[in-house]
């Protein structure tokens, strides 16, 4: 079984990006994303109606980190501390050495290789620091951009569950992609 003890929050640097802990002030940049139907189209979560909901979300994410249950980074540019997205591991199955990755990126920064750069750094962290054996992505079957991203990162389709998730009055399909550790 994995023994996860995050300790001090790990900051990750890439060529263009800085991945850091979410802070209360990030709600100002995250709220517009969480309330935008286009951004949230493939994320089966209710749209945020009030900024207080995003403050609570940040608190929940940070509490999960403090309890060694998950980790989510704020994605920022090296030259600008404003949040442009988030990425993290949640649903960590310690007994199976597996976690689910989730991510969100401001549309103004999509199509520029930012999420690919972010994913490479976070996947390396997951496999080398957390010692995960596999990482999964649960993707809406119609989210072509996300499917292309994970496939570019080496994920393979593991399963397609028909109408396995009920959200806002309808049953949705889930496409499960996974990546096994390259560090054996």
Image (cartoon, grey):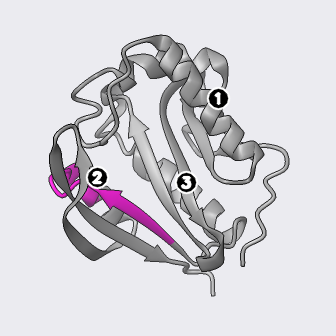
Residue density around tag 1, few if under 14, some if 14–19, many if 20 or more, within 10 Å: some
Residue bearing the label numbered 2: 146
Residue at (18, 58) in percent of width and height: 141
Q: Quadrant of the N terminus?
A: bottom right
Residue at (37, 29) in percent of width and height: 106
Residue at (22, 36) in percent of width and height: 41
Which of pointers 1 and 2 lies earlier in the amino acid sequence? 1
Residue density around tag 3, few if under 14, some if 14–19, many if 20 or more, within 10 Å: some
Q: Which mark is residue 90?
A: 3
| Front position in the image: 76 or 32 | 32
Distance from Cα at disc 3 to Cα at disc 1: 15 Å
| Front position in the image: 135 or 68 | 68
Residue bearing the label numbered 1: 59
Q: Which element type, helix, strand or loop, lies under badge 3?
A: strand
Which of pointers 3 and 2 lies earlier in the amino acid sequence? 3
Residue at (27, 75) in percent of width and height: 159
Q: Tags 3 and 2 in contact by the CB under 8 Å rule?
A: no
User: Is label 1 or label 2 in front?
Assistant: 1
The stretch of residues the image draws in magenta is 135-148
User: Is label 3 or label 2 in front?
Assistant: 3
x%, y% of residue 30?
Answer: 47, 22
* Vertical position of residue 162 compared to residue 84: above or below: below
x%, y% of residue 57?
Answer: 55, 29
| Front position in the image: 124 or 164 | 164
């Amino acid at each position: 079984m994995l023994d996860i003890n995050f300790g001090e929050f790990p900051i990750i640097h890439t060529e263009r990006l800085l991945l850091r802990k979410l802070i209360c002030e990030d709600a100002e940049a995250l709220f517009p994303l969480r309330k935008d139907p286009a951004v949230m189209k493939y994320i089966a979560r209710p749209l945020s109606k009030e900024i207080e909901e995003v403050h609570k979300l940040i608190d929940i994410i940070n509490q999960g980190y403090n309890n060694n249950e998950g980790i989510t980074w704020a994605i920022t540019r090296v030259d600008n501390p404003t949040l442009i997205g988030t990425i993290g591991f949640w649903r960590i199955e310690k007994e199976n050495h597996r976690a689910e990755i989730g991510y969100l990126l401001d549309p103004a920064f999509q199509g520029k290789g930012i999420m690919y750069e972010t994913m490479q750094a976070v996947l390396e962290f997951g496999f080398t620091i957390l010692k995960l054996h596999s990482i999964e992505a649960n993707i809406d079957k119609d989210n072509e951009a996300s499917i292309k991203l994970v496939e570019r990162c080496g994920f393979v389709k593991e399963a397609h569950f028909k109408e396995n998730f009920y959200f806002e009055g309808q049953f949705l399909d889930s496409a499960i992609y996974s990546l096994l550790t390259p560090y054996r």
